[in-house]
Amino acid sequence: MRIAIVSREHPPFGGGIGSWSSKAARGLARLGHDVNLFTEARPDLPADELLGGVHIRRIRPAAVRPRSVAWAWAAATAVGRNGPFDVVQACEWDAEALFCSLRPAAPLVTRLATPHFLVQAMNRARLHQRLRSTFTARMERAQARRSRRIISPTHALAGSVARRWGLDEATIEIVPQAIDPIRTTGKPIPDFLTEVPYVLYFGRLELRKGVDVLIDALPTVLQTHQEVHCVFVGQDMGINGTSFAEYARQRCGSAWSRLHFMAPMPHAPLFDIVAGANLVVIPSRWENLANTCLEAMALGRPIIATTGSGFDEALTNEVDGLLVPPGDAEALAGAMSDALADPALLARLGSAAYRRSQDFTVDRMAARLSAVYEHLVA
């Protein structure tokens, strides 16, 4: 098949959507499909190139606002110019394929990431922020409802979106997330972490990720375990007008010296730090299925995550991870303290998490995607 994947993000720029699109494209190409990935132009990169069997086509949208509309129009135009295609694939975020759904040159498959309505709710966005995203949210819904197929990495996300957008959940295909093989640098981690046990959070520091809940749990944990440090790696999005680093300084008092906030970094050195963590904590209020969870699993790290969302579909409590209620700092503190006091438990959970991570390979995801496409075309 000839497949077009629309993704404004593409590694090394962007986040989870770009990462997923790149992995899916390479996996589909390995199955023999002709895959074209349409992404945004970069001044230091060629307009067209072949990477890993995938035709990367970088396009430049018009300099008009809103940028999401300009990009959706440019993407639809480029797809039409390079067609025909058997299938067009895009995520719902920012309605990247809205015009592809309005002028379908091929069946459109929309993959759910995490729509604006969920992000704004979990981040407790202020009224003016919610109003500003209303237009985008309606575009996302319109694209999804006009798609020939909708896919979701988890049942949790499919159910939430179906209820909000008036969709039949039974028609949403589940295609689980996947991860590439993990590569570390093999170099020493920062000196201040080499001799101490540490708990790790990595990813964006924002309310929907429950970073404030982790910080609220830390005074108890750090008091119980005087030798333990806590590391945060990621972009600090702030809380109530201040940074999470400052919030932690205020909440943790004399234990502040054992907290370390680090800027985002490339995957390889980040994975060195993940591999050395005694415990990875992902306390999201709600989560589709975080790449951070799968990456920590693939590195054999014991994980504490939350119930009620996509984590339930990757981790089984007390088997290959620990799950606590979202937003419950007391429950999180108890689980962290108990786990850190039991090295045998940490080792068992880490080993089981690694084994479970082998179910989330790119080739397995690509085979599932290919089956969805072939059924649609047929």
Image (cartoon, grey):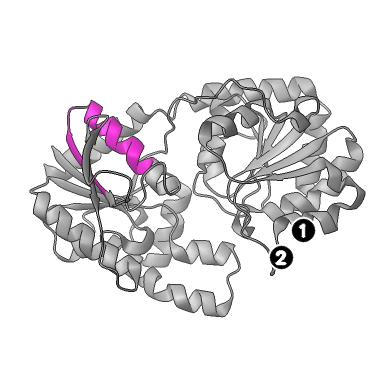
Q: How many marks can you see? A: 2
What is the number of the mark on residue 296? none
Q: Is residue 225 left or right of residue 88?
A: right
Q: Is residue 55 in view?
A: no
In the rendering, at what x and y percent does residue 27 appear? Answer: 29, 31
Front in this rendered view, residue 260 or 129? 260
Q: Is residue 154 left or right of residue 243?
A: left
Residue found at x 55% / y 66%: 121
- Quick check: is 30 in the magenta stretch? yes
| Image-quadrant location for residue 244 | bottom right
What is the number of the mark on residue 242? 2
Q: Is residue 99 above or below residue 335?
A: below
> Quick one: label 2, few (<14), some, or many (20+) residues within 10 Å?
few
Residue matched to label 1 = 246
User: What's the amino acid at mark 1?
Assistant: Glu
User: What's the amino acid at mark 2?
Assistant: Thr
In the rendering, at what x and y percent does residue 70 appear? Answer: 27, 67
Point out the image quarter for the N terminus: top left
- Quick check: is 86 in the magenta stretch? no
Label 1–label 2 contact, CB within 8 A: yes
Q: Which residues are magenta?
A: 20-38
Residue found at x 28% / y 62%: 71
In the rendering, at what x and y percent does residue 166 appear? Answer: 36, 66
Mark 2: secondary structure: loop
Q: Is residue 37 left or right of residue 122?
A: left
As measured in the structure, the alpha-carbon distance from the residue carrying label 1 to the one carrying label 2 is 7 Å
Farthest residue toward the left? Answer: 84
Q: Is residue 2 left or right of residue 52?
A: left
| Image-quadrant location for residue 354 | top right
In the rendering, at what x and y percent does residue 22 appear? Answer: 34, 39
Mark 1: secondary structure: helix
